[in-house]
Image (cartoon, rainbow, N blue to C red):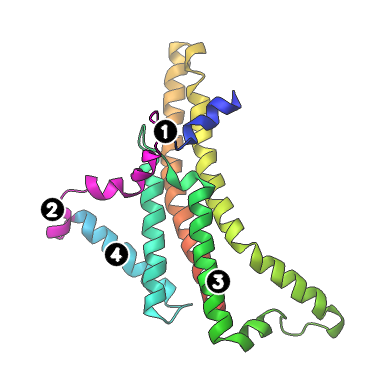
């Protein structure tokens, strides 16, 4: 039973080609051309969201290039999370292979930038202020471990939250054959509520990933 549930996250297709990953850019093909030509409601709303995110990112990051990188990460994860809510569309953001790769690339880039350009600051950051001398070796070890597991925690958080909602909806939908008509309508209502919650989770997880990444960037 569990194998059947997790089969919906299998990226392979019937012809042994992982064409499901094209869903990551599929939304760019579905957008109407008028969205790129005229300032419509979608354009205005997205512009408001981006301006709000830019003002928030500027509190911790001064470099505009880094701000654009984190905005791109936010939009990429957000669009992938929303695409996974449509029927028969592969949810690429629910896979560790994509999330861990994205997290590792970002984390390695930040670490290389920090250790090359701000070596003294990176060493100082390993020991918090007012740390007793006897605890300094342990604090260095703890800070090093917490720094090393950051890409793993970022990817696991996003993967687990995206998988949990899909699995719950699948489990509830598998009960439809054993329910009466009255209970079936209640199940449909529950599925609609869960779908609304999943839409909120899609936005929140993209925001959390971007915020944590920007905080890690501000440390280097």
Instruction: Name the front one of labels 3 and 1.
Output: 1
List the residue tagged with mark 1: 16
Q: Secondary structure at mark 1?
A: loop
Contact? badges 2 and 1 (CB < 8 Å): no
Distance between the Cα atoms at labels 3 and 1?
38 Å
| Mark in front: 4 vs 1 | 1
Magenta-drawn stretch contains 30: yes
Dot 4: within a 10 Å radius of its alpha carbon, few (fewer than 14), some, or many (20 or more) residues?
Answer: few
Query: For the residues carrying marks 2 and 1, which lies nearer the camera in this image?
Result: 1
Q: Which numbered tag is attached to residue 34?
A: 2
In which quadrant of the rendered image does the N terminus lie? Answer: top right
Element carrying mark 3: helix
Residue 201 showing in the rendered view: yes
* 171 versus 129 height, above or below: above
In the image, 116: left or right of 64?
Answer: right
Judging depth in this view, the residue of 77 and 16 nearest the camera is 16
Answer above or below: position of 162 versus 35: above
Q: Magenta residues?
A: 13-40
| Residue 185, horizontal then vertical, whole percent | 42, 20
Q: Position of residue 100 (x, y in %)?
A: 54, 55
Q: Nearer the viewer, residue 155 or 176?
A: 155
Residue corresponding to mark 4: 48
Tell me the quadrant of the picture where the C terminus can be found: bottom right
Q: Nearer the viewer, mark 4 or mark 2?
A: 2
Looking at the image, is mark 3 or mark 1 earlier in the sequence? 1
Mark 3 lies on residue: 216
- Marks 3/2: CA distance? 38 Å
- Number of marks: 4
Residue nearer the viewer, 107 or 182: 107
């Amino acid at each position: 039973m569990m194998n059947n549930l997790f089969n919906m996250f299998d990226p392979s297709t019937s012809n042994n080609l992982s064409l499901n990953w094209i869903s990551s850019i599929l939304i760019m093909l579905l957008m109407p051309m008028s969205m790129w030509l005229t300032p419509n409601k979608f354009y205005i709303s997205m512009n408001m969201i981006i301006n709000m995110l830019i003002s928030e990112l500027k509190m911790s990051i001064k470099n505009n290039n880094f701000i654009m990188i984190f905005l791109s990460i936010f939009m990429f994860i957000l669009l992938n999370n929303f695409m996974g809510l449509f029927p028969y569309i592969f949810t690429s953001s629910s896979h560790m292979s994509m999330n861990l790769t994205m997290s590792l690339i970002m984390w390695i880039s930040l670490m290389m930038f920090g250790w090359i350009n701000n070596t003294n600051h990176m060493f100082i950051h390993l020991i918090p202020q007012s740390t007793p001398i006897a605890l300094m070796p342990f604090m260095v070890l703890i800070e090093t471990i917490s720094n090393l597991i950051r890409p793993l925690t970022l990817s696991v958080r996003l993967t687990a939250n995206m998988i949990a909602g899909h699995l719950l909806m699948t489990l509830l939908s598998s009960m439809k054959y054993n329910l009466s008509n009255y209970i079936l309508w209640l199940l449909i209502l529950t599925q609609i509520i869960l779908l609304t919650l999943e839409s909120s989770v899609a936005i929140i997880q993209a925001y959390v990933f971007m915020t944590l990444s920007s905080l890690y960037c501000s440390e280097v």
